Image (cartoon, grey):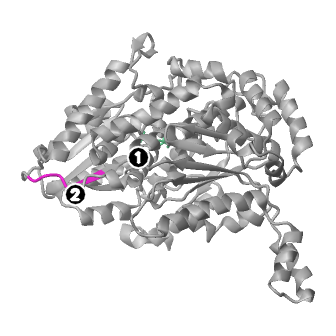
Amino acid sequence: MTAPTHLPAWQALQQDYEQTQSVQMRDQFAQDPERANRYWLEVGGLAVDFSKNRINDQIIADLVALAEQAGLPERIEQMYRGEKINETENRAVLHVALRNRSNTPIKVDGKDVMPEVNHVLRKMGDFTRAVRSGEWLGYTNQVITDVVNIGIGGSDLGPLMMCTALKNFGHPRLNMHFVSNVDGTQMRDVLEKVHPETTLFIIASKTFTTQETLTNAHTARDWFLQAGSEKDIAKHFVAISTNQKAVAEFGIDTEHMFEFWDWVGGRYSLWSAIGLPIMLYLGEENFIELLEGAHLMDQHFRNAPLSRNLPALMGLIGIWYINFYGGGSHVIAPYDQHLHRLPKYIQQLDMESNGKQVQMDGTPVATETGPIIWGETGINGQHAFFQLLHQGTHITPIDLIASLEKRSNLPGHHEILLSNVFAQAEAFMRGKTSAEARAELQAQGVPAEHIEALVPHKTFSGNRPTNVILLDKITPRNMGSLIAMYEHKVFTQGVIWGINSFDQWGVELGKQLAKTILAELTGAIDPQLHDASTSKLVRLYRKANCEADGTCALFQ
Ligand code: F6P
């Protein structure tokens, strides 16, 4: 497989890098009054200002050439045609089918998937209407007031992020809870707040084999059965899965199962039945709006030329920093409290997809791959880690995300928020030269003997990249477009690196080893042969719990 480093465009980009690495963005802005317009794209309700990046027209042209030479246009078509581009799992990758609002047929193994997609959407809609209207009653004929989603990773993060982001659209009677952690304190905290008569549990697991989710699901079931009976389970437990057999074995009637398919990756599944908590909370119409917004971005990604293609450009500019500037991390900074879960969501999307060390054909990658994604609400980040972003030694691109529409009716708040978004982007770009720092200190009347000592500390190198992503409003439609943009950005980067963005074998080893260690911790098996460190940790745990386990004699 041709490594991207062997493509002609890569060599051209290497030259671009050598020629432009010392170019200052502040000079580029001064020389080019059109810069802000040229490096600006709008798709639906999203406007993205990517002008504050270390780019010029030549770099963009070479990045686009790289995408073409790496086969991005063909790869996009393969995905949309339902070809099995997830080769190591022999699966199609069709989150785009889940929001294919044009309903054109998409075939997997010769069979159109759209009728099934629409059938499940209708089933979700019927259930949603019944719960929201109060027609669906618990075992003592009370309406549902609390929904507890039990799932982890892709079966948790998407619904949690969307229900948080779109709280303003939420049903006033429904309290949404999310339990992902097998640390029993999370489940206990939720169970303390809810009542069995009025609670609906959603057990969400693509595989229905995930240890954390099944453990939590059994705990919830046992808790419920202290009040209700087996026959009442049907009114309080539903499942979302691709695994009918395991759902039936758990004791949930498959009539109350919402299905999805192996061609939906866990981290791409919020558009599928995994989105049921979102639909319950926001209503069917708003869920459809979410799908519409994603579909809009899907069409843009498929049809727009690469040089004006928002997700493709976001991916390519990311490659520019990761592979040429050695910037291996990327910050997601939403300036919106309701988007505070977004960094975590993008983290799974990107890191589970592109955290890979071999190309599709199994040969080692020749370059850095997926970046470390991290972040926090921007305004809180400013008072915590932005220092490093401004004056540290790393190049860390930052996405600053905000709503143009005022997010509350509290006077003055939104202006302060947005002034910070724009000011941060300006500060990252401009920096402050030593001459500017000196002049400022002089103007403040700082004694001349202190000025020179302070100047290096008060100087900002600037030239630090940001994308400002503005949503005209935080709506289901715009959130759909935003998330689809990130999905396709991740896809673009995976194609350039020649990796499979849709498997996740790296999560398996720890799971395998934990099985043996669990048996050791519970005393089901004798301590096994491990490295000295692991053995010591196992022994420490067993000793700490030996009184409760009645095994202290072993540790005399
Ligand atoms: O272990 C990682 C992972 O498989 C993720 O890819 C997935 O989103 C999560 O676990 C949950 O998996 P499931 O939905 O099958 O329970």
Label 2 vs 1, first from the N-terminus: 2
118 or 93, nearer to the observer: 118
Q: What residue type is labelled 2?
A: Trp
Residue extending furthest front? 33
Left or right: 450 in relation to 301: right
**Which residue in the structure is indicated by mark 2?**
223
Query: Whole-percent x and y of residue 204?
Result: 35, 42
Q: CB of residue at label 2: within 8 Å of ligand 1?
A: no
Taking the spot 61% from the left edge, 35% from the top edge, the residue there is 310
Tag 1, which secondary structure?
Answer: loop
Q: Which of the 4 quarters of the picture holds residue 63? A: top right
Query: Whole-percent x and y of residue 70?
Result: 73, 24
Left or right: 71 in relation to 550: right
192 or 38, nearer to the observer: 38
Q: Residues within 10 Å of mark 1 (few under 14, many from 20)?
A: many
**Which residue in the structure is indicated by mark 1?**
475
Q: How many labels does the image show?
A: 2
Left or right: 167 in relation to 268: left
Q: Which of the 4 quarters of the picture holds residue 300? A: top right
Tag 2, which secondary structure?
Answer: helix
- Answer whether residue 342 is magenta in the image: no
Which span of residues is magenta-colored? Answer: 142-148
Image quadrant containing the N terminus: top right
Taking the spot 29% from the left edge, 34% from the top edge, the residue there is 258
Taking the spot 53% from the left edge, 42% from the top edge, the residue there is 46
